[in-house]
Amino acid sequence: MRLLKSCSLALLISCHWTPCYASELAESTAKAMPSLEALYLHLHQNPELSYHEKDSSARIAKELASLGFQVTENVGGYGVVGLLKNGEGPTVMIRADTDGLPIIEETGKSYASKVITTDANNNKVGVMHGCGHDIHMTSLVGTAQQLVATKANWQGTLMMVAQPAEEVGGGAKAMLKQGLFTDFDTPDYILGLHVSASIPAGKVGMVSGYALANVDSVDITVKGKGGHGAYPHLTKDPVVLASRIVLALQTIASRELSPLEPSVITVGSIHGGSKHNIISDEVKLQLTLRSYNPEVRLQQIAALKRLTQGIAMSAGLDESLYPDVYVHEEERIPSTYNDPVLVSRVRASIESEIGQDNVIDALPVMAGEDFGLYGLTAEKRPITLFWLGAVNPSQYQLSLESGNALPSLHSNQFAPDYAPTINTGVRAMTKSAIDLFNRP
């Protein structure tokens, strides 16, 4: 980008948030910020749960259509695909997720969500964008605006995807199943961003290679023979068996897997019994499994099946009473592997736009994101998801000095410093896309 000799008033406003890099893109983004902030506030105050993103997707579709995109709605549920063909060149896909979380917001902000709805179990729940998907959608629209405004500077096909149901791991699967890469276009590069609750606004975090984890939900039903609590010798106590299983599962990571391979097995729920002096017939466990390497994931599952069966056998249970281990394959989220070559290119683009000091090395996390699925299709297209700092810099510094933890993603107190976060997200994503179009 050509450097301007001076900053306009709009650009000076943007320099309040980040160092002043006097690019045409910085100036144009600064001018667009009032409308983008209004869009963000609307989306934040009107969140929708997974599989119910009707209004959110309609708003994104309307924004893209107004920019001249060929828009298709209801792809894989409430997914939106916008295509803009601008001559011969590569196809760059940019994805944002749209669903909120069943959380009552307690940020104290004047624009806090007050939405209350009924969930799938007929429970009344609050709804909040506690994972920054409102930032993601706003950045998507802002990036679309900037790329349309600079069509003379790039050639190719821009593919904007607003994906539903990320929080439950279903949206990417559904959109791909409905022909995202076959009925629309097959992207050459796939980009995404995700807000970070641990990086200051104005900065971007990059991870090369594995960035987010495999995620599996597992149910284990531990069976036994119930009876009176006063006569335990006449029973096969499933509470004791379940307790042995919980402890034994920890040896999978410590003694069966390489210490160089990250692995988490967490028992998040254990339920059994009904009264102090009754030994029940069964106990139910709910687990989450996390890893990066797909082979480690298979080792985790095989080991927990073997261990649970062995413990039941050692207790003298008949084979018909061995534990049932159910892996929710339909909810499985694969790890996100950021293509190292694409990461290098995207990093260089972002550094050229917001400054090298504002692009940092981030660490992989054990959270899950179905964005990884886009890189696992038969086409094996390179993907990169980068972290977008969202913490007010003053609050970030105060946290460092005090040692007090910042509100995390999915917290009812998570409140992004939205203006500089959106500004940085639009500039980082737009510059990355333009450079990919121009350097296929």
Image (spheres, grey):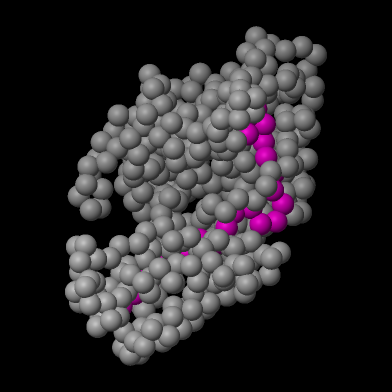
From the viewer's side, name the closer residue of 57 and 362: 362
- Between residue 321 and residue 357, name the one nearer to us: 321
Give the residue displayed 48% in from the left and 60% down from the top: 266
Image: magenta residue range = 199-223
Which residue sits furthest front? 230
**Helix, strand or loop for the magenta stretch, by majority:** strand
User: In which quadrant is the N terminus drawn?
Assistant: top right
Whole-percent x, y for residue 375 in the image: 61, 60
**Residue 148 vs residue 24, the one in the foreground:** 24
- Residue located at (56% from left, 30% from top): 404
Q: Position of residue 352 (x, y in %)?
A: 78, 33
The answer to whether 355 is drawn above or below residue 339 in the figure is: above
Q: Quadrant of residue 426?
A: top right
x 64%, y 38%: residue? 429
Q: Is residue 213 magenta?
A: yes
Provide residue 422's location: percent of width, then percent of height: 56, 29
Residue at the top extreme, as displayed: 9
Residue ID at (65%, 25%) = 401
Horizontal side of 160 relative to 169 (left or right) equals right
Q: Is residue 226 left or right of residue 213?
A: left
Q: In the image, is residue 253 above or below residue 306?
A: above
